[in-house]
Amino acid sequence: MSTVKSPLPDDARKVTGAALQESLVDLVDLHLLGKQAHWNLTGRNFRSLHLQLDELVDLARAHADTVAERAVAIGVNPDGRARTVAETTKVHQLDAGYLQDDKVVAAITDLLAQMIQRFRDRIETTDDSDLVTQDLLIAVAQDLEKQHWMFEAQR
């Protein structure tokens, strides 16, 4: 069995790996919650919000893949298993059942605001451990902030 040798010293790899794993969990859960809202959405703004949620899901999935691959590139195994996500997520969960469009907008806006803060914290954390990962986290935060703006504008 081969392993990937990290380009980072052990202490930097641990800090960076933790930031990447936390980011992966955020993004996987965002993808799942976006689909949950997409499937159960009701209300006057159904069509536009239904499509906007798919955009959010696509963004979360793409960034999750990039984050996971960065983890492997630095010698850290990403863990996106359902159990891991469920046990470690910090993302506020949506209610089960049908979801009114205005409640979805409010919930996704709040969820994104909290997630953006965690990404900004991780950006600071990786300032000393790995600038390449920091750059990746900045790109994710930028996209999350754009999505936040687009949801918040509908409040």
Image (cartoon, rainbow, N blue to C red):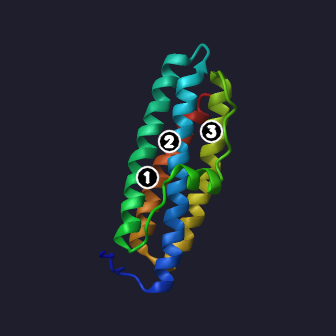
Secondary structure at badge 2 equals helix
Identify the residue position indicated by label 3 in the image: 109
Q: Quadrant of residue 3?
A: bottom left
Residue 64 got which mark? 1
Q: Position of residue 77 (x, y in %)?
A: 43, 67
Secondary structure at badge 3 equals helix
Q: Position of residue 74 (x, y in %)?
A: 38, 74
Amino acid on which disc 1 is placed: Ala
Q: Are marks 2 and 1 in contact (CB under 8 Å)?
A: yes
Callout 1: few (<14), some (14-19), or many (20+) C-alpha neighbours within 10 Å?
many
Task: Give the total of numbered labels.
Answer: 3
Q: Is residue 2 above or below residue 119?
A: below
Q: Is residue 92 above or below residue 152?
A: below
* Residue at x 33% of width, y 80% of height: 5
Q: Are marks 3 and 2 in contact (CB under 8 Å)?
A: no
Identify the residue position indicated by label 2 in the image: 31
